Image (cartoon, helix red, strand yellow):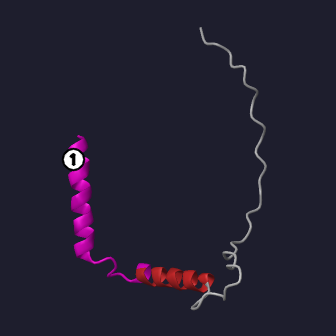
Amino acid sequence: MPVASVASPRAPRVKRNRRPAKPPPPKRGGQPPAGKPWLAVRKGKVARARRLLADPKYPPPKVLDSVARLLAKHLRARD
């Protein structure tokens, strides 16, 4: 016979709006870091990733073959 739970039911979750990402706070008394701001670096990485995904030769067949062999090896071991 199951025992009734004494815990109260959960209150419904409140949807919260996500805030835009903020850059890390500057170090006290220091100069701003040299180079690109972190958001510009991220945009560059996203743009590079999109270019790679649009390339039909990416990833190279050699890489795909090695990943397929690795997966097959480990998946067979579980059977």
Query: Which of 67/55 is in front?
Result: 67
Q: Is residue 55 covered in magenta?
A: yes
Query: Which of 57/12 is in front?
Result: 12
For label 1, the crowd category at 10 Å Cα-Cα, with few meaning under 14, some 14 to 19 and many 20 or more, is: few
Residue at 74% x, 67% y: name it.
19
Residue at 77% x, 57% y: name it.
16
Query: Which of the 4 image quadrants contains residue 3?
Result: top right
| Residue 22 x %, y % | 70, 74
Q: Which residues are magenta?
A: 53-79
| Residue 26 x %, y % | 69, 79
Above/below status of 53 relative to 78 = below
| Residue 14 x %, y % | 79, 49
Left or right placement of residue 48 versus residue 12 in this view: left
In the displayed image of the protein, which residue is found farthest to the bottom?
35
Above/below status of 77 relative to 35 = above
| Residue 18 x %, y % | 73, 63
State the residue position of label 1. Answer: 76
